[in-house]
Image (cartoon, grey):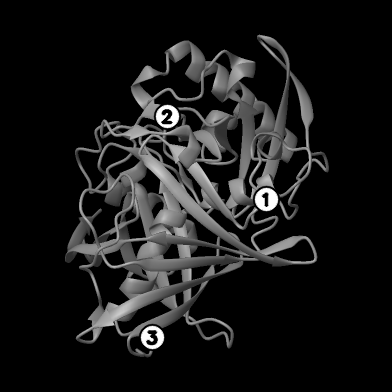
Amino acid sequence: MNKVPCTIMRGGTSKGVFFKYEDIPADKNKWSDFLLDVMGSPDARQIDGLGGANSLTSKVAIIKKSDKADYDIEYTFAQVSLTDKLVDFKGNCGNISSAVGPFAVNEGLVEITYPKTEVRILNTNTNKLIISEVEIENGQAKVQGDTYIPGVPGPGSPIYLSFYNSDGAVTGKLLPTGNVLDCIETSIGKINISIVDAANPLVFINAKDIGLKGTELPDEFTEEKLSLIEEIRSIAAEICGFSSKEEATKKSPAVPKSTIVSTPAEYDDLSGNKRKKEDMDLVVRMMSMQKPHKALAITGAVCITAAASIEGTIVNQIVKNSSDEIRIGHPGGVMKTFARGASGKIQCVKIIRTARRIMDGYVYTR
């Protein structure tokens, strides 16, 4: 057995295993087998590894000190499948990204400044810049604070994540098909979708077009609806050139991500808190590896913000707010994003997260 140093960190509403680049196999062709063994996949329970039997806890971050002038850290994200022998490196995870800055600070990979350290991160999956602002206390990333984020019990120190020039993160195009709307043929007939690629590619579906209210909580989605949503996502994966629609579930399970959108409406979130429609600009139900997300992916929030600014997209048709702030209702609560731009183009989307280090140690692998 091989003994490999690692750290488990929560980033936003996800949890992942963090490795330093120099501690994992030098041959990148061996990364997938290595990470499958680390997480205990393929196995829905992940009983023989560090995975948590959920797509939100079957994630990995590989961290390297950058030798590039414009960056401090290079970060590679991996989504490890629970049930298939597959590790997806195509897209990024914004929640896990929020733990990269604190990890880099605590590992001494960046020069610390008080009271806040700015970490310039190159996400190698998308070749995009993320700037993480980390509060510092006693030479380490501050953990305790008063910031609450929906989907995480308890407050923490705020981490400000800014995603820069996120257009075309995976496909190279903000609108992979060149269209704000695409009409596709499905088992229930023709429907319109919008495919937008910013931070990660998302396929947007209007809830009413597939017989949903849009305020459903994760356990309220029937297998029939989940199959329909995956059918639509698979067609979008083929349109984007990721795989054939017949093989999309196995070969491209993480991108594009299905995102159900609807007009603001009152609903009870997963904690039983009543969310008022006047406190949001739209309602979103996102899928993660073919299952309903219990909160909202950060890269999803970035893409939603971008889609809201594009005239004619399904998101734009719903969001009536013309300010730089968008309030997104999701199963865990309401998330706010803040956009900065010029000449009608979004240059940066900022989101507030929290993160914390949970464990340092070693994982034993075959």
Q: Amino acid at mark 2?
A: Lys
Q: Which structural element holds mark 2?
A: strand
Task: Tell me where residue 60 sits by quadrant.
Answer: bottom left
Q: Is residue 266 left or right of residue 212?
A: left
Binning the other alpha carbons within 10 Å of mark 2 as few (below 14), some (14 to 19) or many (20 upward) gives some
Q: Residue 24: tell me if it is visible.
A: no
Residue 287 point in image, percent of width and height: 48, 33
- 1 or 3: tag closer to the N-terminus: 3
Name the mark nearer the viewer: 1 or 3: 1
Q: Amino acid at mark 1?
A: Ser
In the picture of the structure, the residue carrying the numbered disc 2 is 291
Q: Is residue 322 left or right of residue 39?
A: right
Residue placed farthest to the right in the image?
A: 178
- 1 or 2: tag closer to the N-terminus: 2
Q: Residue at x 54, y 29 (%)?
A: 249
Return the residue nearer the eye: 128 or 58. 128
Q: Residue at x 40, y 70 (%)?
A: 63
Return the residue nearer the eye: 326 or 33. 326
In the picture of the structure, the residue carrying the numbered disc 3 is 110
Q: Residue at x 61, y 41 (%)?
A: 202
In the picture of the structure, the residue carrying the numbered disc 1 is 322
Taking 78 as reference, is 75 above or below it? below
Binning the other alpha carbons within 10 Å of mark 3 as few (below 14), some (14 to 19) or many (20 upward) gives some
